[in-house]
Image: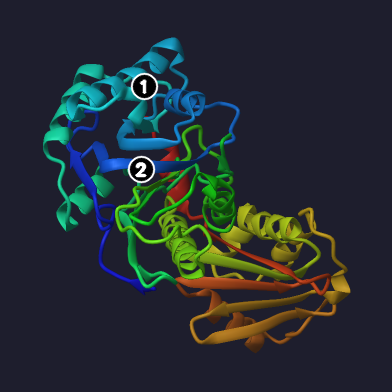
């Protein structure tokens, strides 16, 4: 596989557009993705009990194939009751009319402020405008990716070229948004993170279980603030236009798809509201995979860990506290803790006791933590399973951004 410069329209047959319709004051605020032929759809939804209107609509319809997807930013259409539900249905119907397809072939999602009704004349204007501007190429990729962001500091894209086992070549493209209210627990068939992946590979109807596992190892392993959004959604569209054999079990395709999703996940974590550092936590030698994931997320979600890393404070007791609050089974005397940053990789804890004691050693740990990427590695000595997740530090700016989010 090869990482290439590209985005959502890189695979054959996919078009996109991003327009300004007035939901936001000046920024692009409505994106559209379109496939020239019907594409199989595999969708992960938020498991938050409070679900936005478009999430409710999509889960009720449970589409197996789609031709288009509408995404507006600036307004989440969440906690908007019956009116919000009908507005989401209207968005689908309007897009279907503009594209001359059926409403059930259109997906819909929103992101932005919660508890406000959509300005539907503006949304309808944007849908009609986007449908006329659909095209492929880097400009289309970037305008669509820009139209879906909220407090993100920039667009998030990914693209891969993959040679399958049968010798055919396929493409994977993607875009995502997410900066705050991020701790996804996306479930197939069940801040906001939104991600859209397109591919021209041939996939079967049975790919849902594979997609769930990929989500479990990527988007479901990130956390900015521990709060799961009402609008989280992750969409994979596969139109099969590259031809060739079914790629469900092709190892190179699966590796590329997993890496594309992990790359988007890391980008979302690094772009957390007010973030200055990316935190990568790896837990090895756990009894089970769920226990490894639980340990990772407990460390990533700890405000004390996040603030310590923000201040480059080598307070490893906070990491161990968070580990102890997880559902993971371990013996403290078997735990090995290491911190990496830049060219420094420093053992911190072995056998339940610190490896370093003098002030000079503390300063070396501080130097490792004073990097853009800080890696925390925990070996539990309890089994053979491992997991990796990503988060960010907690800075003063996170409080400022969220204290002023509505006003």
Tell me residue 256's x, y (percent): 44, 66
Q: Using a 10 Å C-alpha cutoff, classify the residue at mark 1 as few (fewer than 14 neighbours), some (14 to 19) or many (20 or more).
A: many
Image point 47% across, 75% down: which residue? Answer: 371
Image point 46% across, 60% down: which residue? Answer: 247
- CB under 8 Å between discs 1 and 2: no
* Rendered-image quadrant of the N terminus: bottom left
- Closer mark to the observer between disc 1 and disc 2: 2
Frontmost residue, 298 versus 190: 190
Task: Provide the residue designation for mark 1.
Answer: 88
Relative to 335, is 182 on the left or the right? left
* Rendered-image quadrant of the C terminus: top left
Quarter assignment of residue 97:
top left
Tell me residue 178's x, y (percent): 41, 47
Residue 243 in view here: yes
Q: Using a 10 Å C-alpha cutoff, classify the residue at mark 2 as few (fewer than 14 neighbours), some (14 to 19) or many (20 or more).
A: many
Q: Secondary structure at mark 1?
A: helix
First of labels 1, 2 by sequence position? 2
| 288 vs 130: above or below | below
Relative to 292, is 131 on the left or the right? left
Q: Residue 43: give its label.
A: none
Count of numbered circles on the image: 2
| 205 vs 47: above or below | below
Quarter assignment of residue 63:
top left
Image point 45% across, 28% down: which residue? Answer: 58
Q: How is the image coloured?
A: rainbow
Task: Provide the residue designation for mark 2.
Answer: 39
Frontmost residue, 201 versus 99: 201
């Amino acid at each position: 596989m090869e990482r290439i410069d590209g985005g959502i329209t890189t695979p054959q047959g996919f078009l996109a557009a991003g327009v300004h319709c007035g939901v936001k004051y000046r920024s692009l605020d409505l994106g559209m993705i379109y496939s020239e032929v019907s594409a199989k759809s595999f969708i992960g939804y938020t498991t938050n009990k409070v679900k936005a209107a478009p999430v409710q609509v999509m889960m009720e319809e449970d589409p197996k194939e789609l031709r288009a997807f509408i995404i507006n930013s600036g307004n989440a259409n969440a906690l908007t009751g019956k009116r919000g539900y009908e507005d989401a249905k209207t968005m689908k119907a309007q897009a279907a009319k503009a594209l001359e397809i059926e409403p059930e072939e259109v997906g819909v999602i929103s992101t932005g402020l919660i508890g406000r009704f959509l300005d539907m004349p503006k949304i309808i204007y944007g849908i009609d405008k986007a449908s006329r501007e659909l095209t492929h190429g880097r400009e289309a990729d970037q305008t669509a990716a820009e139209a879906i962001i909220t407090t993100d500091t920039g667009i998030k894209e990914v693209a891969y070229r993959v040679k399958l086992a049968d010798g055919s070549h396929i493409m994977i493209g993607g875009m995502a948004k997410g900066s705050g209210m991020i701790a996804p627990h996306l479930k197939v068939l069940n801040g906001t993170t939104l991600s859209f992946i397109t591919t021209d590979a041939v996939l079967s109807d049975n790919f849902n279980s594979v997609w769930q596992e990929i989500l479990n190892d990527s988007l479901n392993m990130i956390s900015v603030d521990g709060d799961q959004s009402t609008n989280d959604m992750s969409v994979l569209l596969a139109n099969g236009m590259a031809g060739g054999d079914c790629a469900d079990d092709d190892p190179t395709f699966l590796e590329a798809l997993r890496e594309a999703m992990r790359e988007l996940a890391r980008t979302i974590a690094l772009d957390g509201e007010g973030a200055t550092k990316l935190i990568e936590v790896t837990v090895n030698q756990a009894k089970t995979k769920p226990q490894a994931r639980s340990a990772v997320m407990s460390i990533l979600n700890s405000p004390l860990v996040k603030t310590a890393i923000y201040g480059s404070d080598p307070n490893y007791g906070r990491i161990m506290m968070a580990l102890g609050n997880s559902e993971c089974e371990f013996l403290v005397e078997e735990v090995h803790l290491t911190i990496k940053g830049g060219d420094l990789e420093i053992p911190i804890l072995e056998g339940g006791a610190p490896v370093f004691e003098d002030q000079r050693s503390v300063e070396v740990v501080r130097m490792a933590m004073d990097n853009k990427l800080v890696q925390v590695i925990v070996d539990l000595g309890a089994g053979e399973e491992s997991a990796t997740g990503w988060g960010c530090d907690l800075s003063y700016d996170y409080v400022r951004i969220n204290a002023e989010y509505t006003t």
